[in-house]
Image (cartoon, helix red, strand yellow):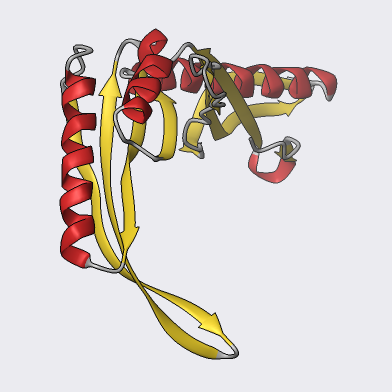
């Protein structure tokens, strides 16, 4: 947020203020990226193993009723070790990562546990989102404009200047939402996932036309 103090320009009869607004929203969508990585010396063998385990993971997740699943990443990398300052061939790594989206946030832990029990060994990313971010952002933006108005009114009253709430310009100066996420995994227990609120901020710079001192 922009915390710059109001600026009064007597010669131009204008005042410039910053306004900020904030809305905390309960997320309604979870995004996970998880999958399988296999390492080995024989590329065809570890590709086949990765395909087998990835298929098992995919089918198991679908059995939970999750249908929004896409391939996020598929990579084959060479691996190297170093001994006595020399580079030694260590085989290959095959990595297949799925992106999973679900509106049932309570099911996130179950999805992870199911994937791991069926062969997944990578959990790269968990994020929580709001499907209607634009609507909540407009609420925050309205709060920011109202905040700017109150600041301008307070300052002009304090210096004895007549205040006519007529904005000359409004400049949007906002950041994206700030997501919060938590993940932990404990062997033998259901993976606990807690989704905190998403903070959506909006900020504006507003120039108001005002009257003369004493008016």
Q: Quadrant of the C terminus?
A: top right
Residue at 31% in and 35% down: 119
- Asked whether, in this view, residue 215 is left or right of residue 148, the answer is right
The residue depicted at 57 percent of the width and 23 percent of the height is: 186
Q: Nearer the viewer, residue 209 or 92?
A: 92
**Rendered view: 20 above or below 86:** above
How many labels sit on residues? Answer: 0
> Residue 176 versus residue 71: which sits nearer the camera?
71
Q: Is residue 81 left or right of residue 48?
A: right
Q: Is residue 76 above or below residue 146?
A: below
Look at 33% across and 21% down and name the residue there: 114
Q: Residue 178, relative to residue 93: is it above or below?
A: above
Observer able to see residue 165 = no
The x, y position of residue 87, in whole percent, is 47, 87
The quadrant in which the N terminus is found is: top right
* Residue 198 percent across, percent down from the top left: 51, 21
* Residue shown at 23% from the left, 39% from the top: 53
The percent position of residue 72, horizontal first and vertical second, equals: 24, 45
Left or right: 109 as drawn, with respect to 167:
left
Residue 203: % across, % down: 55, 32
């Amino acid at each position: 947020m922009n915390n710059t103090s109001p600026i009064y320009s007597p010669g131009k009869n204008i005042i410039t203020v910053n306004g900020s607004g904030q809305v905390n929203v309960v997320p309604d969508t979870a995004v996970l990226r998880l999958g399988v990585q296999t390492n080995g010396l024989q590329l065809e063998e570890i590709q086949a193993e990765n395909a087998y385990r990835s298929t098992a993971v995919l089918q198991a997740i679908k059995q939970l009723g999750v249908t929004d699943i896409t391939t996020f990443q598929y990579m084959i990398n060479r691996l190297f070790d170093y001994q006595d300052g020399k580079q030694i061939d260590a085989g290959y790594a095959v990595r297949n990562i799925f992106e999973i989206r679900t509106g049932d946030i309570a099911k996130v832990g179950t999805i992870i546990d199911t994937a791991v029990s069926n062969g997944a060994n990578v959990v790269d990313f968990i994020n929580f989102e709001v499907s209607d971010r634009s609507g909540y952002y407009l609420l925050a933006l309205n709060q920011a404009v109202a905040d700017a108005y109150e600041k301008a009114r307070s300052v002009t009253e304090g210096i004895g200047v007549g205040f006519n709430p007529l904005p000359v310009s409004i400049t949007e100066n906002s950041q994206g939402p700030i997501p919060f996420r938590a993940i932990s995994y404990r062997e033998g227990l259901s993976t606990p996932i807690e989704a905190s609120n998403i903070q959506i901020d909006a900020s504006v710079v507003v120039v108001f036309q005002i009257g003369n001192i004493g008016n």
